[in-house]
Amino acid sequence: MRLRIERTDWPRPGLYLTNTPRPNCGDCGGHGVQEWDYGDDAGEYAGTDWAYCACWNPNGRWLFLPLPRKPLPRSGPDPWASDEPPF
């Protein structure tokens, strides 16, 4: 396994240990996916298809350190605010 630390907001904010593709893979060249172009019946370009390479599992990640979520915006006045002096 080739692990790295990644900050992600999904499925929850946190630092994740993530598996990475093998850098010297002969099939994908270290990108983790294999791509190929395909054409229609007339031989024109119709798109690109891709598949994950066997050297990498994109679902191989584990939560290392959870991070706090952003607070939701409040509507209305601040309940702790007042015009009185502090003492």
Image: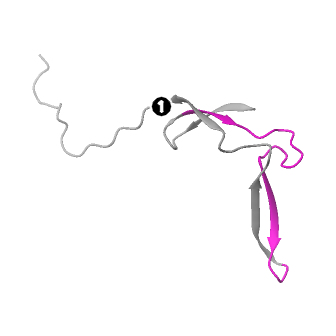
Quadrant of the frame with the N terminus = top right
Q: Residue furthest bottom?
A: 42
Q: Residue furthest right?
A: 26
Give the vertical position of 75 relative to 64 (above or below).
Answer: below
Q: Give the colouring mode of the picture.
A: one colour
The x, y position of residue 42, in whole percent, is: 83, 83
Residue 7 in magenta? no
6 vs 31: above or below: above
**Region of the chain picked out in magenta, as a range:** 15-43
- At 70% from the left and 36% from the top, the residue drawn is 19
Residue situated in front as seen by the camera: 17 or 47:
17
The relative height of residue 48 versus residue 15 in the rendered view (above or below) is: below
Q: Quadrant of the C terminus?
A: top left
Quarter where residue 61 is shown: top right
Q: Which residue does the image show at 75% across and 56% down from the upper left?
A: 51
Indicate left or right for 53 with 59 as reference: right
Residue sitting nearer the eye, 71 or 21: 21
Q: Check disc 1: other Cα within 10 Å, few if <14, some if 14-19, many if 20+.
A: few
Q: Position of residue 12 (x, y in %)?
A: 49, 40
In the rendered view, tell whether residue 33 sits above or below residue 64.
Answer: below
Residue, disc 1: 67
Q: Is residue 63 left or right of residue 44?
A: left
Residue 44 position, x and y percent, is 82, 78
Q: Amino acid at mark 1?
A: Leu
The kind of secondary structure element at disc 1 is: loop
Tell me how many marks there are.
1
Q: Is residue 31 magenta?
A: yes
Residue 63: x and y, percent? 56, 33
Question: Residue at horizontal 79%, vertical 49%?
Answer: 53
Q: Residue furthest top?
A: 87
